[in-house]
Image: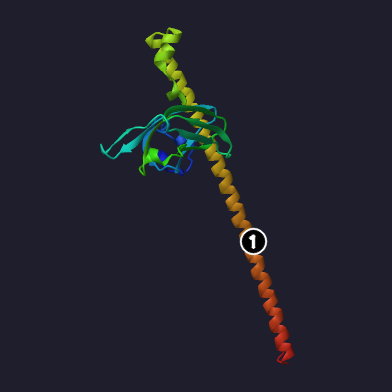
């Protein structure tokens, strides 16, 4: 989904006016993101993910180099690696690590908001790129989508019904986190609106005072001018 390439600004809305099916679609769409992109040898690509707090995120990626002879992208060599850096909404680095040409990174959000995920190649050997581009396939899973339910069922010896109930419970928990995040965004939007309105009000008052002061000064100046010319 190319949506993660854009920082969409959505006007917060009251949760009670939000249909349940819209919320479910939003949760499913938001928390499953898959894409691929191209980068140069020293280029860095960053993505924005809006994530609720206390939510696990798993990213899987694999790299491919362009083969000019075969005219197609082939799996990258083992000597090529990727450096992954993740920052929270407060610009605090919560993950900074080097991986191989294919890897998996995991982190948990502790602050709700926009998290920045950046990737770039660790290669300093231009021969690896041969002047071409590197294709990176990235799959980001958020919340309950990070769970491997097949492994959970085998480990805990759950029946199909028990596993389904567990899935539903975790989905409800994720929806609740998303609702809390939407409330958080709505509160921030309200605070921003109130602050903006207050600043506009004070600026209007200052402008009015300035105009009154200028008018008073002009009257005094004209009065002094007429008195000096003995016209009054």
> Residue 192, how many percent across, how many down?
57, 47
> Residue 189, how many percent across, how many down?
54, 43
Badge 1 marks a residue whose secondary structure is helix
Looking at the picture, tell me which residue is in the foreground, 183 or 112. Answer: 112
Colouring scheme, one of rainbow, by chain, secondary structure, one colour: rainbow
Residue at 44%, 15% in the rendered image = 166
Would residue 193 be seen by someone viewing this image from the given angle?
yes
As drawn, is 43 to the left or to the right of 73?
right
Residue lying furthest left in this view? Answer: 70
Examine the rendered structure and indicate whether residue 56 appears above or below residue 220: above
> Residue 102, how many percent across, how many down?
41, 28
How many callouts does the rendering have?
Answer: 1
Q: Residues within 10 Å of mark 1 (few under 14, many from 20)?
A: few
Name the residue that disc number 1 marks: 205
> Residue 148, how many percent across, how many down?
42, 18
Residue at 59%, 56% in the rendered image = 200
Residue at 41%, 41% in the rendered image = 126
As drawn, is 73 to the left or to the right of 120?
left
Q: Quadrant of the C terminus?
A: bottom right
Q: Quadrant of residue 90?
A: top right
Looking at the picture, tell me which residue is in the foreground, 77 or 15. Answer: 77
Q: Quadrant of the N terminus?
A: top left
As drawn, is 84 to the left or to the right of 74?
right
Residue at 70%, 92% in the rendered image = 231
């Amino acid at each position: 989904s190319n949506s993660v390439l854009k920082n969409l600004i959505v006007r917060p809305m009251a949760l009670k006016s939000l249909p349940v099916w819209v919320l479910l679609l939003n949760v499913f769409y938001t928390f499953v993101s898959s894409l691929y992109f191209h980068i140069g040898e020293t280029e860095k690509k960053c993505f924005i993910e809006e994530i609720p707090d206390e939510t696990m995120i798993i990213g899987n990626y694999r790299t491919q180099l362009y083969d000019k002879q075969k005219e197609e992208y082939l799996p990258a060599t083992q000597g090529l690696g990727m450096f992954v850096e993740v920052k929270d909404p407060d610009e605090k680095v919560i993950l900074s690590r080097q991986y191989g040409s294919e890897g998996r990174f995991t982190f948990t959000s502790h602050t709700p908001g926009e998290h920045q995920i950046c990737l770039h190649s660790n290669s300093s050997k231009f021969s690896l790129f041969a002047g071409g581009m590197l294709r990176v396939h990235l799959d980001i899973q958020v919340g309950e989508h990070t769970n491997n339910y097949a492994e959970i069922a085998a480990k805990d010896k759950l029946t199909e019904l028990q596993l389904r109930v567990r899935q539903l419970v975790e989905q409800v928990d994720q929806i609740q986190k998303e609702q809390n995040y939407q409330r958080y965004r709505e509160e921030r939007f309200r605070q921003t609106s109130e602050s903006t309105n207050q600043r506009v009000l004070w600026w209007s008052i200052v402008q009015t005072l300035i105009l009154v002061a200028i008018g008073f000064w002009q009257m005094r100046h004209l009065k002094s001018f007429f008195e000096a010319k003995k016209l009054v």
